[in-house]
Image: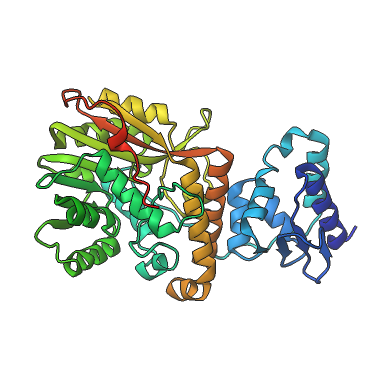
């Protein structure tokens, strides 16, 4: 059987297992299989493309086949990734899996890669290595991030009350919800751990009258955040530091940590929460917003994944109960816990749509490979949130002595229409 027939047989096996809706598949010679009205098309660039995509059967293998252009995914990337997600349990169908593997091994072997996988060296979650890991992700280029984020450059989950509302509106609401939950008042001191390009500290200073300090390990983020503070006329109330959270001293009335805990590592959680606890005054509160895993069996760090290799080196997604346990062991009390799982799925769908719409500018700001990495990473993350494999929580953590406030009205998002 030649590679074209083998590829057709492999495609047919995958479709039988995953079921409809299936993407179409177009081979290197233009031959197309599958539904004529398919919303996505998998494009095979050469006779060994499916072998590159599926052997060994890991998400790292599949991701590398896409970013190195062994395969392409035209049309609706979410339809293609949802199809792939339905194949996760293929190994349970032993006979089908054996036939599939036999056919894959009969395809031509791919050419060896000249480019090595990125590697971050040093002591895991040591300060020097953490800075390298953060730089790998966030110093992709401010112009690149502008191609898919909202105008405020908020790079975290938005807060949707209507799935059809604009991204910018949902992001502004998220900033306001964080301020409401922290009960910010004029004159309070706010620390934003992992401040990004400064959206939260700018909003909190302008709308709630606080004095804010934002910290980030990214040089590019810090530089642009400082420019934005200057442009907003808030230099007297907002300071941006390029610093590790472990180096921060002083006392604060409130701390926000949004999209930061994923970088900390499970073994470091107790130190993370203890240090932030020590920075808060006696009535202080911490708003910890982070992605969590719903897989209670996986231990991070054993096998490289596509995301850990190309997107978030050393990132760890920890089940929510372990995060909460670490926080409480550090002296915090949970006052509120809210899941924003589907809000993050909506956020990511907006980001992918923006990235695809601005493809030429994104490639010019970085390169084709970076564009592909982020397209498939964000698309795959959206599918993972929708399928419930991962979630995201906002945990409002207080020192136990803080006066109790009855009801939840002050924590809820205002419906701004």
Image quadrant of residue 403?
A: top left
Q: Nearer the viewer, residue 51 or 220?
A: 220
Residue depicted at 82% across the width and 50% down the height: 103
Is residue 57 left or right of 275 when viewed as pictured? Answer: right
Residue 254 seen in the current view: yes
Comparing 321 with 301, the one in front is 321
How far from the left and from the top, in percent, is residue 116?
51, 60
The answer to whether residue 368 is seen in the rendering is no
Measured from the top left, where is residue 13 in percent x and y?
82, 47
Q: Residue at x 14, y 31 (%)?
A: 283
Colour treatment of the image: rainbow
Please tell me in which quadrant of the rendered image residue 42 appears. bottom right
254 sits left or right of 45 in the view? left
What residue lies at 24% left-to-right and 63% top-to-bottom? 225
Residue 252 position by quadrant = top left
Horizontal arrangement in the rendering, residue 9 relative to residue 226 (left or right): right
Residue at the right extreme, as displayed: 1
Q: Where is residue 309 in the image (x, y as percent from the top left)?
A: 48, 51
Residue extending furthest toward the front: 417
Residue in the foreground of this view, choosing between 188 and 41: 188
- Count of labels shown? 0
Q: Which of 383 and 183 is in front in this view?
A: 183
Quadrant location of the N terminus? bottom right
> Relative to 89, is 333 above or below?
above
**Image position, residue 16 (x, y; %):** 82, 45
* Lateral position of residue 108 relative to residue 336, left or right: right
Residue in the image at 30% along x and 37% along y:
411
């Amino acid at each position: 059987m030649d590679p074209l027939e083998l590829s057709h047989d492999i495609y047919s096996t995958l479709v039988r297992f995953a079921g409809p809706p299936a993407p179409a598949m177009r081979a290197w010679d233009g031959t197309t299989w599958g539904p004529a009205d398919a919303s996505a098309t998998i494009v095979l660039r050469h006779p060994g493309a499916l072998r590159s995509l599926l052997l060994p059967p890991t998400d790292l293998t599949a991701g590398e086949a896409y970013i190195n252009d062994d395969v392409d995914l035209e049309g609706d990337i979410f339809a293609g990734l949802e199809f792939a997600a339905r194949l996760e349990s293929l190994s349970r169908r032993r006979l089908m899996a054996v036939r599939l593997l036999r056919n894959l091994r009969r395809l031509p072997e791919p050419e060896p890669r000249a480019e090595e996988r990125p590697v971050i060296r040093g002591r895991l979650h040591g300060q020097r290595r953490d800075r390298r890991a953060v730089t790998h992700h966030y110093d992709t280029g401010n112009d690149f991030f502008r191609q898919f984020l909202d105008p405020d450059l908020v790079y975290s989950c938005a807060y949707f009350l209507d799935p059809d509302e604009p991204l910018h509106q949902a992001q502004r609401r998220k900033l306001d919800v964080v301020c409401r939950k922290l009960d910010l008042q004029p004159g309070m001191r706010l620390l934003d751990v992992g401040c990004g390009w400064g959206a939260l500290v700018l909003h909190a200073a302008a709308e709630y009258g606080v004095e804010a300090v934002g910290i980030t390990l990214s040089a590019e983020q810090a530089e642009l955040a400082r420019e934005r503070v200057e442009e907003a006329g808030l230099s007297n109330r907002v300071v941006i530091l390029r610093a590790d959270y472990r180096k921060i001293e002083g006392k604060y009335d409130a701390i926000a940590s949004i999209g930061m805990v994923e970088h900390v590592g499970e073994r470091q959680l107790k130190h993370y929460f203890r240090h932030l606890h020590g920075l808060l005054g006696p009535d202080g509160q911490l708003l910890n917003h982070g992605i969590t895993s719903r897989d209670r069996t996986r231990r991070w760090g054993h096998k490289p994944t596509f995301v850990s290799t190309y997107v978030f080196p050393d990132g760890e997604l920890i089940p929510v109960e372990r995060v909460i346990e670490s926080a409480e062991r550090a002296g915090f009390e949970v006052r509120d816990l809210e899941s924003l799982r589907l809000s993050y799925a909506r956020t990511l769908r907006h980001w992918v749509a923006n990235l695809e719409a601005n493809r030429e500018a994104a490639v010019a700001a970085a390169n084709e490979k970076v564009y592909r990495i982020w397209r498939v990473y964000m698309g795959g993350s959206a599918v993972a949130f929708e399928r419930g494999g991962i979630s995201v929580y906002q945990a409002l953590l207080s020192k136990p002595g803080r006066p109790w406030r009855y009801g939840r009205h002050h924590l809820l998002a205002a419906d701004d229409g």
